[in-house]
Amino acid sequence: MDQPNSVTGEPAGAQRGAWRREDGAVSLPEAHRSVLVPAGASFWRKMLAFAGPGFLVAVGYMDPGNWATDLAGGAQFGYTLLSVIMISNLMAILLQHLCVKLGIATGRDLAQACRDHYSKPTVWFLWILCELAIAACDLAEVVGSAIALQLLFGIPLVWGCVITAVDVMVVLLLQHRGFRYLEAVVITLILTIGTCFAVELFLAKPDVGGVLAGFVPRTEILTHPGMLYVAIGILGATVMPHNLYLHSSIVQTRKYEQNARGKREAIKFATIDSTVALMFALFINGAILVLAAAAFHKSGHENVAAIQDAYHLLDGLLGVGFAGILFAVALLASGQNSTLTGTLAGQIVMEGFVNIRLRPWLRRLITRAIAIIPAVIVIGYFGESKTTELLVASQVCLSMQLGFACWPLMRFTGEKAKMGEFVNPWWIRILGWTITLVIIGLNIKLLLDIAGLTDGPTP
């Protein structure tokens, strides 16, 4: 094995551009190449065969953590932060496209690629950061699902958090029946969420002009500490680091021709799949913020950031008796949907980074325990009023991890020795590195604001 460079910590072979391991294990072996893409089929039939992974990834872009940040942004600042949701979604489309390219062109997911390139200490460091990001995401799912159970059935939040551990059996059942069943359930739940919010928006009657103006970026977002804090929370809730690892793996569930032509076609269809799914996620996130702006900001309820408060206020503000129920049903569907993909992401990063293979039920229980314990402690000690702060903080934590996933993704997909003819063209390299540096820069500024090292109050 090549000796690592004393400055960069990378193996010498990696610096020359070659993968350290040319015959690595496949990603997510139980589902690898399990979905047949018929050769010579029509465009739409192939599109249908490739449809699915993008929606599993899109789940992470509309999980309960998004709800807290979007509600806070809409209630406090009206439609202003719609531009942040739009920009975050465009960033996500590009980054997920690069994940598709990496997985299809190299046969490696992002975690495996890191293990094949970086030194062991760097790999373990990146793995720990990724596990923290998954725990933060799972925390949001636990709290969100518990809140929905409380609103719909009156179950106390602490017990709701514990009940969420039962979803382990649902995930195992779906994985056992086949990957297509998992995708079908996820898409059904996404459609449920979308239908609920379409009705809510119809009832809220938002200001169309204000909505359109909200998509125009403003410099005020960068100079206002409170607005920046929520904006970075939205960024963390939208572009999720573990989704980059997840997507680069699950695109390999399709069985297509393993040659240059087959890979080019697979990249095209998989990119269409993820782009369509992420545009649907843009609608969901935008709908939550627009609903908060139209119902709460407009009526003077600017301090409404808690999901529970939104539920109780919606019926009166929208003038119907079922608006709150629709809101809670969509929240429960969102939380349960996110738990399905969380299991896959945890399995992929553990196997990819450090080649540790656990039984799926054990892996899921470990991940859930890491999320449930802090949720129960915070709710039990501080009370149920702190759940929203917990959700927003979890999303800011996710954003902090994002740069550590984007950097290797950009590096690997930009090296011809690793990607061959599928290497990023110059304009994608410029866009991708700009996105990565902006993410890192915003996170540094947020840390300085929180630490009180910059002018202005901390958020």
Image (cartoon, rainbow, N blue to C red):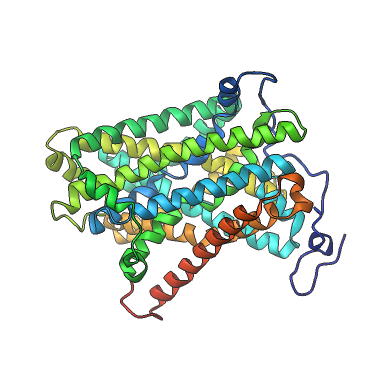
- In this rendering, the answer to whether 444 lies above or below 138 is below
Tell which of 450 and 387 is nearer to you.
450
Image-based side of 383 in relation to 348, left or right = left
- In this rendering, the answer to whether 370 lies above or below 11 is above
Q: Quadrant of residue 189?
A: top left
Q: Quadrant of the C terminus?
A: bottom left
Expressed as whole percent of the image width and height from the top left, the position of residue 40 reads: 69, 19
Q: Quadrant of residue 222?
A: bottom left
Tell which of 223 and 395 is nearer to you.
223
- In this rendering, the answer to whether 317 lies above or below 321 is below
Expressed as whole percent of the image width and height from the top left, the position of residue 427 reads: 60, 54
Image point 76% across, 51% down: which residue? 418
Is any atom of residue 340 visible in this view? no
Image-based side of 98 in relation to 329, left or right = right
Expressed as whole percent of the image width and height from the top left, the position of residue 141 reads: 42, 46
Image point 43% across, 27% down: which residue? 188
Image point 15% across, 33% down: which residue? 321
Q: Quadrant of the N terminus?
A: bottom right
